[in-house]
Image (cartoon, rainbow, N blue to C red):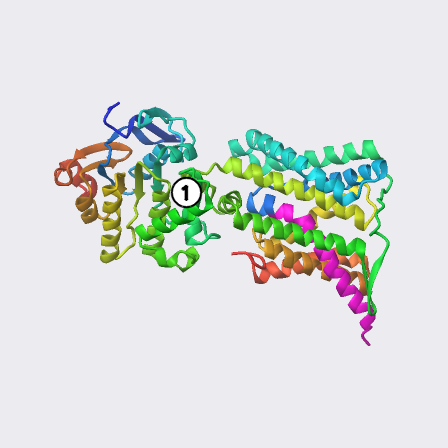
């Protein structure tokens, strides 16, 4: 395993019955790095992320986070170590206000216990993601882009070292995509390594320092965005023969 | 010709019965509505509470309600232990739906038989200063033995609602009821949160037991009469909603009392479940469900 990696995997395999969703994925993410993870629908991106974050147990292989083997670690423990993710479809706690949604990871993942400090930090996180004005509203009153920001805010409140943003821009307009990109860049500037899973290629190209391509559960290409997008196998996977 | 005397008394009795139903159903709203645990043994824990109150009242002269309030913390830890067992045996393996149901069904009978062996089949009652007297307001009579359970029942729902709103554990209970997967990924341990919540649920059942034996004499098997009612109140209220539980409990309490007064007690369950089906037909998520 690479010693420079903050998050890495070796030979990760995931099977669903007779179907092999991941065929042995090797992956490295450096500190403060921005990596794009792309691939056609069904290529195994979300399955891989679920294995990394502990939502799914992998059938073979190892996952290392900052020098700790987290392969068999519960998802909530990984979150407390600093591995956060946002969801493809926003999953706010709908019975809690926007600020209370942010307070949950501050209390659990970040381990804060002082009410005043938690409330102050929650307001700070909301200001960073541009939701300060919505603090006391319920998630139902938020627009799509605001829900994505809440997802990112909730992940940010966990004080992550690594953030996995799973299709954080899907279904958004061009200007909204730019808003999320700016926000992700700001988070990266604050020292958080980010894995961006995305279908919007202009976002992937603008954001990523390195791109990894998964097809049918296997890694077929890795490199700079321009190199990867002109890779013959990637072109074939996206455009067909 | 409406007999206002009869109607007023029936309505007041209905509200008081609804208050007691709040105490009985709040634990099921937590366990079934919020945690998705089909604890059909809940009424058996209510009976356990009733017999704890009976034992300390008849043996040591302790006030029945006080006995159960003191017993509630022990019930809380017992409930936590029980959830841990349920989790390790069933929920962890995804086998909670049928086998978990069988687990709680078994528990229901074990508790019931245990109480039968210890206390027998005779009806038991408690003695307390407030059980006999009533408050007379015009032609409406309010017995203390019904008023006290109403006050305690509403206070219990209020306390749980306050706990959920004001504490991090309470908010985590709301979060786990909505999306345990998302809670896990923001560092919360759903198993721990559910364990705490289930402990609270069992503690409320024990206190509700004291209220039951204050209202009426009990014998171990009458707990089964409450299985349908507590689940009906939870579903009618909207599963996770505590205000919904209060409204549903009051609705059922009033409906049952009016039915008993004007049509006879045998119609009471039919009317109650008729209201449940009618409400769900119009509003499938329940009164305050989302």
- Judged left or right of residue B9, residue A69 is left
Answer whether residue B123 is magenta in the image: no
Quadrant location of the N terminus of chain A in the rendered image:
top left
Chain of the residue under the numbered disc 1 shown in the image: A
Total numbered badges shown on the rendered structure:
1
Residue A86 on image: x %, y %: 35, 44
- Dividing the picture into quadrants, the one containing residue B288 is bottom right
Residue B154 on image: x %, y %: 67, 54
> From where the camera sits, is residue A45 visible?
no
Residue A119 on image: x %, y %: 42, 49
Mark 1 crowdedness (10 Å alpha carbons): few <14, some 14-19, many ≥20: many
Answer whether residue B26 is magenta in the image: yes
- Judged left or right of residue B21, residue A25 is left
- Judged left or right of residue B285, residue A26 is left
Q: Residue at x 82, y 52 (%)?
A: B130
Residue A152 on image: x %, y %: 33, 47
Query: Where does label 1 land, which residue?
Result: A106
- Between B82 and A13, which is closer to the camera in this rendering? B82
The secondary structure that dominates the magenta segment is: helix
Residue A72 to residue A185: above or below:
above
The span picked out in magenta is B1-29
Q: Residue at x 53, y 49 (%)?
A: B166
């Amino acid at each position: 395993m690479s010693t420079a990696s903050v998050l890495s995997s070796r030979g990760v395999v995931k099977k669903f019955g007779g179907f092999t969703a991941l065929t042995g994925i090797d992956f490295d993410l450096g500190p403060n790095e921005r990596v794009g993870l792309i691939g056609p629908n069904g290529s195994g991106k979300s399955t891989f992320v679920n294995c990394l974050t502990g939502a799914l147990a992998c059938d073979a292989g190892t996952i290392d986070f900052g020098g700790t083997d987290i392969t068999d670690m519960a998802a909530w423990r990984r979150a407390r170590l600093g591995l956060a993710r946002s969801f493809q479809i926003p999953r706010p706690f709908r019975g809690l206000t926007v600020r209370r949604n942010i307070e949950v990871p501050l209390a659990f993942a970040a381990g804060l216990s002082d009410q005043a400090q938690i409330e102050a930090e929650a307001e700070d996180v909301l200001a960073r993601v541009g939701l300060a004005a919505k603090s006391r509203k319920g998630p139902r009153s938020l627009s799509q882009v605001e829900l994505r920001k809440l997802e990112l805010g909730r992940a940010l409140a966990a004080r992550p070292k690594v953030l996995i943003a799973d299709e954080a821009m899907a279904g958004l307009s061009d200007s909204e995509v730019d808003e999320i990109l700016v926000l992700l860049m700001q988070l990266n500037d604050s020292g958080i390594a980010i894995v961006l899973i995305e279908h919007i290629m202009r976002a992937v190209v603008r954001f990523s320092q390195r791109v990894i391509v998964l097809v049918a559960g296997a890694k077929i290409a890795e490199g700079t965005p321009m190199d990867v997008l002109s890779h013959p196998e990637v072109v074939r996977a996206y455009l067909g023969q | 010709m409406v007999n206002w005397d009869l109607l007023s008394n029936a309505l007041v009795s209905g509200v008081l019965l609804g208050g007691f139903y709040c105490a009985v159903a709040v634990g099921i709203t937590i366990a079934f509505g919020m945690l998705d645990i089909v604890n059909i043994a809940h009424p058996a824990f209510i009976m356990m509470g009733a017999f704890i109150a009976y034992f300390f009242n008849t043996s040591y002269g302790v006030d029945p309600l006080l006995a159960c309030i003191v017993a509630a913390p022990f019930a809380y830890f017992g409930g936590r232990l029980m959830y841990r067992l349920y989790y390790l045996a069933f929920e962890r393996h995804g086998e909670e739906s049928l086998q978990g149901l069988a687990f709680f069904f078994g528990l229901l009978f074990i508790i019931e038989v245990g109480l039968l062996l210890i206390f027998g089949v005779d009806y038991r009652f408690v003695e307390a200063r407030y059980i006999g007297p009533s408050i007379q307001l015009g032609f409406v009579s309010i017995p203390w033995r019904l008023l006290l359970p109403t006050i305690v029942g509403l206070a219990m729902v209020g306390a749980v609602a306050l706990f959920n709103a004001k504490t991090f554990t309470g908010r985590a209970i709301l979060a786990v009821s909505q999306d345990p997967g998302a809670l896990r990924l923001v560092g919360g341990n759903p198993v721990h949160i559910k364990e705490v919540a289930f402990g609270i649920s069992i503690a409320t059942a024990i206190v509700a037991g004291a209220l039951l034996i204050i209202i009426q004499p009990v014998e171990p098997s009458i707990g089964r009469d409450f299985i349908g009612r507590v689940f009906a109140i939870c579903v009618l209220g909207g599963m996770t909603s505590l205000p919904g539980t209060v409204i549903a409990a009051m609705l059922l309490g009033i409906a049952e009392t009016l039915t008993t007064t004007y049509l006879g007690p045998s119609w009471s369950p039919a009317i109650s479940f008729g209201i449940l089906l009618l409400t769900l037909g119009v509003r499938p998520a329940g009164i305050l469900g989302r």
